[in-house]
Image (cartoon, grey):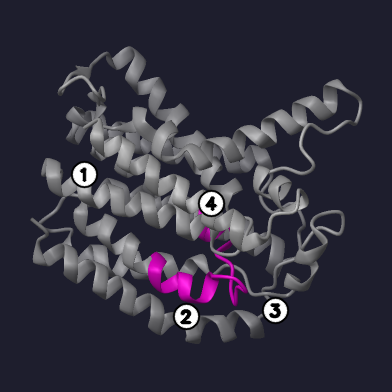
Amino acid sequence: MISLEVVLSLLIAFGISVILSPLVIPFLRKLKVGNTEREDGVKAHLKKNGTPTMGGLIILISILVTSLMFAGRYPRIIPVLFLTLGFGIIGFLDDYLKVVLKRSDGLMPKQKFILQFVLTTIFVIYILVADPDCLRVMLPFTGGMYFECVWITVPFVYLVVLGTVNGVNFTDGLDGLATGVTTMVAVFFTVVSIGMGAGVEPITAAVTGALLGFLMFNAHPAKVFMGDTGSLALGGFVAGTAYMLQIPILIPVFGLVYMVEVLSVIIQVTYFRKTGGKRFFKMAPIHHHFELSGWSETQVVALFTVVTALLCLVCLSGL
């Protein structure tokens, strides 16, 4: 049964997101916090140059304000909110360096990795001390069996968190893509949390509401982009919630789009280096390959979002 808290958190976050967007977007435009498209990329994207980015601040504020209203009664919200905000702050620093200070590379890869590693370590320590049951990994389609082995599950947290965060980051490349896909995942999390009594449904519903509100301004043609501020935050949310629900092993299924996006980049870079400059895909991440193959931006977004919705249903059948 859907509780009043779930409905309220969704509506409050949606309302904050819808109200903030028309206020924040002009502010970002005045700061000239604009997106810069690659000259050698998809030519149709060049018209997006100058579109305000760092809109992930709208999502973060909506989630934070709403979640804090329910954190007292739902303590499992706290670690999820920590990862969401923590990775969002890393994304904000990266965006700020790139688009405000005009440092093209943003945070150096080593700096970004260290910050992400530290955040994940704090999350692991919290789980070990406050909620060790979250390290019990539910095995789908087994009727409720779990896998337990700290020597395996603890290192696995780093792989899951860092892989998921960067997968969501690579997914953010088309109008409404990361927003639409992650909305499906957030709805799935909400249903699972309610069914299992996991106690994270207020934040999953808040993320759903925040993203739906943001999508009104991020859908094609986008008036604002979430930037790394939003995509890294959403990656932290997906990974953190999966652990609170004890289903990190299902991320490659319901998060297949994230995984394919990051794998396409790895394959492209590896193939390019091994073949002396040849490309495996027309362009990576793979959503750009579809575009260069003749698909419209809205078709790619619709496909990836629908696939995610269907895969979430598959996962539900296995729980």
Q: Tell me which segment is drawn in magenta.
A: 211-231
CA gap between label 4 and label 2 equals 26 Å
Nearer the camera: disc 3 or disc 4: 4
Looking at the image, can residue 85 be seen?
A: no
Q: Give me the residue at 65% from left, 37% from top.
A: 110
CA gap between label 4 and label 1 equals 24 Å
Is residue 224 found inside the magenta-colored segment of the image? yes
Circle 2 residue? 21
Nearer the camera: disc 3 or disc 2: 2
Q: Is residue 259 left or right of residue 319?
A: right
Image vertical order of residue 16 relative to residue 160, above or below: below
Q: Give me the residue at 78% from left, 65% from top.
A: 44
The image quarter in which residue 100 lies: bottom right
CA gap between label 1 and label 3 equals 41 Å
Viewer-side residue, 238 vs 256: 256
Circle 4 residue? 303
Q: Secondary structure at mark 1?
A: helix
CA gap between label 2 and label 1 equals 30 Å
Circle 3 residue? 32
Which class describes the residues within 10 Å of circle 4: few (<14), some (14-19), or many (20+)? few
- Where is residue 313 shown, x and y percent of the image? 31, 42
Q: Is residue 18 left or right of residue 264?
A: left
Viewer-side residue, 315 vs 151: 315
Check whether the beta carbons of the residues at disc 4 and disc 2 lie within 8 A of each other: no
Viewer-side residue, 225 vs 81: 225
The image quarter in which residue 131 lies: top left
Check whether the beta carbons of the residues at disc 1 and disc 3 lie within 8 A of each other: no
Nearer the camera: disc 4 or disc 2: 4
Instruction: Decide which of tag 3 and tag 4 comes sooner along the chain.
Output: 3
Check whether the beta carbons of the residues at disc 3 and disc 4 lie within 8 A of each other: no
Q: Give me the residue at 69% from left, 44% from top.
A: 108
Q: Secondary structure at mark 2?
A: helix
